[in-house]
Amino acid sequence: MWRVWKLYDPLRAMVVQGVFLFGLAAMIHLILLSTVRFNWMDGMSQVEYKASIQNSSMPK
């Protein structure tokens, strides 16, 4: 394992890993915010609206 760290600088490797993980987390959050089901910033109003339409009685 020590030969690997002779090839790569540990500080640079950790910085690159941190930037990659932050970018991955931001991408996942933006994808979830773009969906109707997992958008926690709208207060789930669209999901509750769809559920109320689905549970309403049939017209006569």
Image: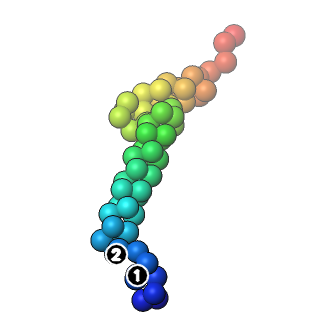
Residue displayed at 45% across by 45% down: 27
Q: Element at badge 2?
A: helix
Q: Is residue 38 visible?
A: no
Q: Quadrant of the C terminus?
A: top right
Circle 1 sits on which residue?
5
Local crowd at mark 1 within 10 Å, few (<14), some, or many (≥20)?
A: few
Outermost residue to the top: 60
Q: Inspect this view and state whether residue 24 appears.
A: yes
Is 47 in front, or is 56? 47
Q: Kindly identify the residue that appears in the image at 49 percent across and 40 percent down.
A: 31
Spot the residue most to the bottom: 2
Vertical relation: 14 (above or below) 52: below
Query: Is residue 59 rendered to the left or right of residue 29?
Result: right
Expressed as whole percent of the image width and height from the top left, the position of residue 36 reads 50, 32
Circle on res. 10: 2
Residues under numbered marks 2 and 1 in contact, where contact means CB atoms less than 8 Å apart: yes
Residue at the far right in the pictured view: 60
Residue 30 screen position, x and y as percent: 43, 39
Residue pictured at 54% horizontal, 26% vertical: 50
Left or right: where 14 falls relative to 58: left
The alpha-carbon separation of the residues under discs 2 and 1 comes to 6 Å
Q: Does residue 56 lie above or below 37 as drawn?
A: above
Residue at disc 1, secondary structure: helix
Residue 51 in the image, given as x and y percentages of width and height = 54, 30
Q: Say which quarter of the image contains residue 53.
A: top right
Tally of marks: 2
Q: Which sits earlier in the primary sequence, circle 2 or circle 1?
A: 1
Give the residue drawn at x 46%, y 47%.
28
Q: Residue furthest front?
A: 7
Q: Residues within 10 Å of mark 2 (few under 14, many from 20)?
A: few
**Residue 8: x, y in percent?**
40, 74
